[in-house]
Structure formats: structure tokens, C-alpha cells
Amino acid sequence: MSPGEDLLSALRPMFVSVDAAGRIAALGPTLEKVLGRVAGRPFFEVLEVVRPRDVQDATGLCASAGRRLHITARAAPETGLVGLAVPDGAGGVVLDLGFGIGVAEAVRRHGLTGSDFSPTDLTMEILFLIEAQRAAMTASRRLNNRLHAARQTAEAEAATDMLTGLANRRAADLALAALGEGDAAFGLVHLDLDRFKQVNDRFGHHAGDMVLKDVALALKGAIRPEDLAARNGGDEFLMIFPGLSDLARLEGLCARLIARIERPHAHGAARFAISASAGIAVWPGGPGSDPGALLARADAALYAAKRAGRGRAASAPAPTGASGAESGKSGRKFLPEGLDPPGRKP
């Protein structure tokens, strides 16, 4: 390499010198990393001028002096180059090349470092800014993900009973309100534990909490994925069944659930049994549903079950039309025949 080419290599490590015959006479060390040892080979055998399209031979290359060239390496077409050709005074040209907007990908692909660029080249500063922006965006995404996860956790906790893991009354109210806005059929079960106060009084609240957790597991095992089981407070529970208004099916479910709850419980050395009563109400579908009225009917059926001896389920007849629902909306609770308004829990 001549002294002039040594100087070019130091100042412009991506230069390429093309002689009058169109062969590569010399190239800078950085460009050699990208293209390999190509000195002596025809320029257009190694590189292709993509734009302007009329630069397709040595004559066109010499005539392109002062024009911006877009070039690709034939062996690495994914690496784009941009450059400027300057006549060398001997019939050839010297091209000063760069990576343009593809510099970040070229650096990664070819393993280039700061020493591969001229000290006055802004490439490394640009790469630093790109990396800083990428780091900032990554940090921002992580923060947003954490905030999203925290928000989801907070929303889940706001709708969850912390002791049992069931939905809470707020979640049940929202689910009932959503069903009330549609015309679909749905069923509702209001379940209350029998003799639960005796467990708390005799064995303590730890035993009572254990019972509530066990009942919650029974409820989760009894419902479908689309159903909702909620702790209404204390020892009361609600089950909501979208699309299910078959009283016979709900009565069978409650019978199995009550039998499961009546299995003996153990707390330490203590053994005890409880039971449950349930009230069932359904909306058969169509406009005019009133979740508040339906809940009142399920509540009335629950107290009828308790008066009938506990450990059983009672069903409120389905309303016969929109008038049944409207009675709840007008402020009068719709109660099935033979059921009195709820009073003090038995």
C-alpha cells in the first residue's frame, strides 16, 4: 500500500481505490472486514451500484464523480453502503463509503468497534445514542409492564375475598349488573351456612376460617369456568350462572354442594359438622331483568329453606313475564307464592 493509501486508511478506513481498468487497487481496513481481501478484483464483481442505475461499469463509475452512490456488496447484499466517488487524477477514482442508516445493523453483523471508524466519524456517537434510546425504551417497557401488572393485581384484589380467594360482593354486584344489561338467561344461588356461629363460638375463629376456605373450595369445584362464586360476607355466598336457568339442574347442583359441605370437618383434635341452606332464583331470558329483584327472590327462597329445616335448597318460581321483573323495579320485591319477605337469619 502506498503512503497515500496508508494515509487514507488512517483517515478514511472505509475507502476503496479503483484504478483506470476498473479493478480495486486498495481498500481501507474496515471495508476489508466487511468485504474480505478483494484487492485486485474487478470493482463490479465485488460491489453493485444500486443507484444511480446508469453506473454499471468503470467508465460510468469515473463519470459519477460528485454524485451520491448507493452500493451493496454482492457477497453481503444485506449490508447497504453509501458513498462518493472522487477522481484520482490517473484515470481511476477513490470512493469514500459509509453504512448510512444501516450502521447499527452493520456494526452488529460484522463485529465492528470504535477503532474501525475514523476518530472524527460520528458513527460511534450515533450508535451510543441509538443504544441509549434502546435502553431507555427497554426501561420504559419494563416500567409499563410492572405498572400494568400492579394495576391488574390491584384490580384482582379489589374484586377478591382475601380469606377464601373467591370473588367478593363488589365483583358479584358488577357481574349481576352486566347480566342485567343483557337479555340472556341466568341463575342465582344464595347460600348460607347453618350452625356456623357455633363453630366460631366453640372452636374459635381459626376453625371458622378453615370452614370458610373449605366451603370456597367446594363452590369452586361445583361451578363452570364461566360461572362466578362469591363470598357475600360472613358465612354467606353467591353463585351466578350465566346462561343457566334450569331450576332442576341448579337444585341438583345445590343438593350435591350441601352434601359436600356436610362432610365432617376437623380442626386439631376437634371434629364437627355444619350444613348449608340455599335459595335459587332464575331469569329465563329476555328484556326487563332486574338483578336486584332476582337477588331478593333468591334471598326469600333461602329463608324458606331455613324455615323448612335447613340443610336444603328452595327455589323461587321463575317470573312469568316482564311484569315480574318490573315489580322489582317499581320498588316492590317480587316474592314467590308462599315465601315471606326475609327477616332475621334463623
Image (cartoon, rainbow, N blue to C red):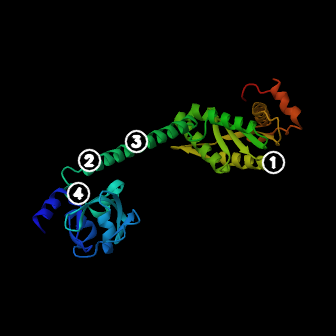
Q: Is residue 29 above or below residue 154?
A: below
Labels 1 & 3 near each other (Cβ < 8 A): no
Q: Amino acid at mark 1?
A: Asp
Separation of marks 1 and 3 at Cα, in angstroms: 51 Å
- Rendered image: mark on residue 140: 3
Q: Amino acid at mark 3?
A: Ser
Instruction: Indicate left or right for 220 with 293 as reference.
Output: left
Which residue is the extreme one toward the left? 3
Q: Nearer the viewer, mark 1 or mark 2?
A: 2
Query: Where is residue 76 drawn, in percent x and y?
Result: 34, 69
Q: Label 4 crowding class (10 Å Cα cut-off): few <14, some 14-19, many 20+?
A: few
Q: Earlier in the sequence, mark 1 or mark 4?
A: 4
- Rendered image: mark on residue 246: 1
Query: Which residue shows up at 85% across the image and 28% down it?
Result: 327
From where the camera sits, is residue 104 visible? no
Q: Earlier in the sequence, mark 2 or mark 3?
A: 2
